[in-house]
Image (tube, rainbow, N blue to C red):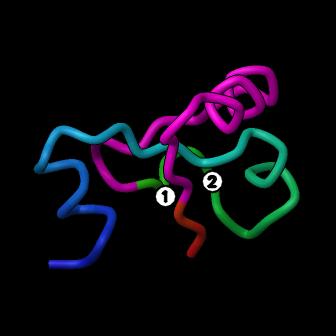
Amino acid sequence: MDIPAGLIEGGAPVEMCALLLPNSEWKLASLMDGVGVATPQEAATARLRPRMRVLSF
């Protein structure tokens, strides 16, 4: 099991940055089940929360 799948299975939200998606080879249909797309505002708000952990792959 890879890390995103394990996080999703454990109930953690897994989201891709909306700014990265159109500027990469990835398409919305390419994302694994359970992976969402965060708006820039959602991503910024999440990063400002205390105890928030952000993992980049």
Mark number, residue 39: none
Find out whether residue 31 is within the magenta segment.
no
Closer-to-camera residue (35/13): 13
Q: What separation in Å lies between label 1 and label 2 (alpha carbons)?
A: 5 Å
* Residue in view at x 56 percent, y 75 percent: 57
Q: Is residue 49 left or right of residue 45?
A: left
Query: What residue is drawn where x is 25% and y is 78%?
Result: 2
Q: Residue at x 80, y 30 (%)?
A: 40
Residue 5 place in picture, x, y as percent: 23, 62
Question: For residue 4, what is the image quadrant?
Answer: bottom left
Q: Is residue 7 above or below residue 50?
A: below
Assign a secondary structure to mark 1: helix
Q: What is the number of the mark on residue 27?
A: 2
- Residue 15 screen position, x and y as percent: 51, 43
Tell me the kind of residue under disc 1. Answer: Ser
| Image coordinates for residue 44, horizontal then vertical, percent | 77, 31
Q: To which residue does mark 1 refer?
A: 30
**Left or right of residue 32, residue 44 in this image:** right
Location of the N terminus by quadrant is bottom left
Say which residue appears at 47% left-offset and 36% top-offset.
36
Mark 1 is surrounded, within 10 Å at the Cα level, by few (under 14), some (14 to 19) or many (20 or more) other residues, namely few
As drawn, 30 above or below 8:
below
Magenta segment boundaries in residue numbering = 32-54
38 relative to 39 in the view: left or right: left
